[in-house]
């Protein structure tokens, strides 16, 4: 799965306003192509967050280290070094993270 909400490599990203914490919410969805659970998680995130919070989608198949780390255990949503949810969205954890950043 290609990065949907993140700029392509080498592309200029548009400036975003930072929240009260001084940090922009930053979510990474580790995924793989043709993964129905991954697609469902992304849809649930878009439904919950809209387009205001960027989600960078990383296909683990393109990186041997990520493939070894996550194997078949995708999707995994992380914020920095914190895993927010695995396999299905945890709306409460996602909302708490976004609120903390704002």
Image: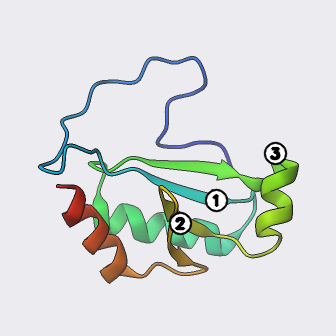
- Alpha-carbon distance for marks 2 and 3? 17 Å
Labelled pair 1, 3 in contact (Cβ < 8 Å): no
Residue appearing at x 74%, y 76% in the figure: 73
Labelled pair 1, 2 in contact (Cβ < 8 Å): yes
Residue 37, by quadrant, is bottom right
Q: Residue 77 bears which disc, if any?
A: 2
Q: Is residue 6 above or below residue 90?
A: above
Q: Residues within 10 Å of mark 2 (few under 14, many from 20)?
A: many
Percent position (x, y) of residue 20?
11, 49
Q: How is the image coloured?
A: rainbow
Q: Residues within 10 Å of mark 3 (few under 14, many from 20)?
A: few
Q: Residue 39 bears which disc, if any?
A: none
Q: Residue 62 bears which disc, if any?
A: 3
State which tag comes first along the sequence, 2 or 3.
3
Residue appearing at x 33%, y 24% in the figure: 14
Residue appearing at x 38%, y 47% in the figure: 54
Residue appearing at x 60%, y 69% in the figure: 76
Percent position (x, y) of residue 36?
67, 72
* Left or right: 10 as drawn, with respect to 19: right
State which tag comes first along the sequence, 1 or 3.
1
Percent position (x, y) of residue 85?
51, 77
Q: Is residue 101 above or below residue 97?
A: above
Q: What residue is shown with label 1?
A: 30
* Left or right: 16 as drawn, with respect to 60: left
Element marked by disc 2: strand
Outermost residue, left direction? 20
- Alpha-carbon distance for marks 1 and 3? 11 Å
- Alpha-carbon distance for marks 1 and 2? 6 Å
**In the image shown, does 92 or 36 lie closer to the viewer?**
92
Figure label count: 3
Element marked by disc 1: strand
Element marked by disc 3: helix
């Amino acid at each position: 799965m290609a990065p949907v909400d993140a700029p392509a490599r080498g592309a200029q990203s548009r400036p975003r306003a930072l929240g009260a914490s001084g940090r922009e919410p930053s979510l990474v969805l580790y995924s793989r192509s043709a993964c129905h659970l991954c697609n469902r998680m992304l849809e649930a995130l878009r439904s919950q967050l809209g387009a205001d919070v960027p989600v960078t989608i990383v296909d683990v198949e393109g990186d041997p280290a990520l493939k070894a780390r996550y194997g078949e255990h995708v999707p995994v949503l992380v914020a920095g070094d914190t895993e927010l949810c695995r396999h299905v969205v945890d709306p409460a954890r996602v909302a708490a993270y976004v609120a903390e950043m704002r």
